[in-house]
Image: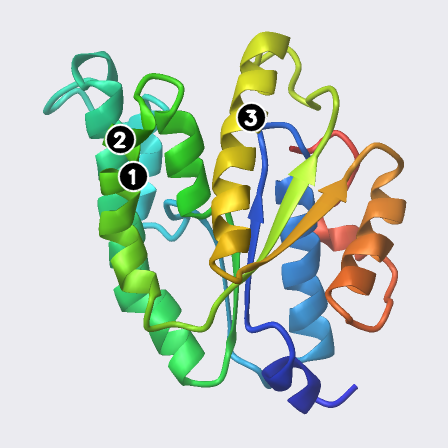
Amino acid sequence: MQSEGAATGPRLIVFEGVDGAGKTTLHRALAEYFRVQYPEVPLYADVFPGSVPGTLGEWVYRFHHGQTTSEGPQLEQVSPAALQLLHVAAHVDQIQRRIAPTLRAGGVVLLDRYWWSTYAYSRMTLPPEKVWPMVNAERAFWRDLPQPVAVYVSRGVSLKAKEIAPEAHAQLAAHYHEVMDFEREQGVEVIELENEGSVEETWYRLLDVLHLPRQPLAARSGATQGVG
C-alpha cells in the first residue's frame, strides 16, 4: 500500500462514545493499522486529555482518576465544571504541541475522545448555556486545522456496565446526540458505528466507512471484545 493514500485520506479521525462503547479498542486497532500500512506517514495517536507521560494531559487524566500525589487539591475538592475546564486546558496544550505539528507535517492524528466528551459529561451537571462557552474556548483552536471525521461508537449496553448505570448511559448518549446534531449542521462528517456484534465485524465496518482497504484486526493492538 502506498503512503500517499493515508496523506490524501482522513487525516484527523476522532472516536467518541459513552464509556464502554468500544471506542478505545477501535482506536488502538486503527493506530496499529496506520503504523503497519503507512509506516512513512507521521502518526499521532492519543487518548484525550493525554496519555504521554509528562504532559499536562497525562497529569489531568491521573488527577481525574485520583492517581496524583497528596500535594495540592484532591479530586473531591474540585467542582465538576472546574474539572472539565482542566480537560479543556489539556486539550489546547495537545492541539498546539502535538496535533497541529503532526498535521502540518502531512501526518495523521487519531484521538480517543474529543471536545465532545467535555460537552457530554459537563451536560450531566450543567445547562447548555454554561457548557457551550467552556467547549468554545477549545473549539477556537480546532478551527485552523482540517475538519475531523468523527466516529461515534454506540452500544445498547455498555461493556463497562459495572461502572456506569443504565440511566447515566442513556443520559450521556442523549447529550452526545445533541453535539452530533450540532456538528452535522457545521458540515462535520459524523459516522455512527454500532458495536453490537463481534469486534471483528465492527472493525471491518470501520475500515469500510473510512474508505480504507480491509486488513485483519491486529492481534497486538489489544483489540478484544470487552475493551471500552
The amino acid sitting under disc 1 is: Trp
Asked which secondary structure carries label 2, the reply is helix
Question: Few, some or many C-alpha atoms within 10 Å of disc 2 (few <14, some 14-19, many ≥20)?
Answer: few
Which residue is at a point 18% across and 19% down the rendered structure image? Answer: 78
Using the rendered view, name the quadrant where residue 130 is placed. Answer: top left
Residue type at mark 2: give it. Glu
Q: Nearer the viewer, residue 100 or 223?
A: 100
Residue 225: which numbered mark, if any? Answer: none
Task: Identify the residue position indicated by label 3 in the image.
Answer: 174
Q: Secondary structure at mark 3?
A: helix
Callout 2–callout 1 Cβ contact below 8 Å: yes
Number of residue marks: 3
Q: Which mark is nearer the camera, 2 or 3? A: 2
Between 195 and 30, the residue placed more toward the observer is: 195
- Position of residue 94 relative to residue 126, above or below, is below
Q: Nearer the N terminus, badge 2 or badge 3? A: 2
| Tag 3: amino acid | Ala
Q: Residues within 10 Å of mark 3 (few under 14, many from 20)?
A: some
**Circle 1 sits on which residue?**
132
Quadrant, the C terminus: top right
Kindly indicate whether the residue at mark 3 contacts the one at mark 2 (C-beta within 8 angstroms). no
Give the residue number, with chain letter if any, for mark 2.
Answer: 129
Judge whether residue 113 can be spotted in this image.
no
Name the image colouring.
rainbow
Q: Is residue 47 above or below residue 100?
A: above
Specify whether residue 97 is in view.
yes
Identified at 48% across, 85% down, the residue is 106
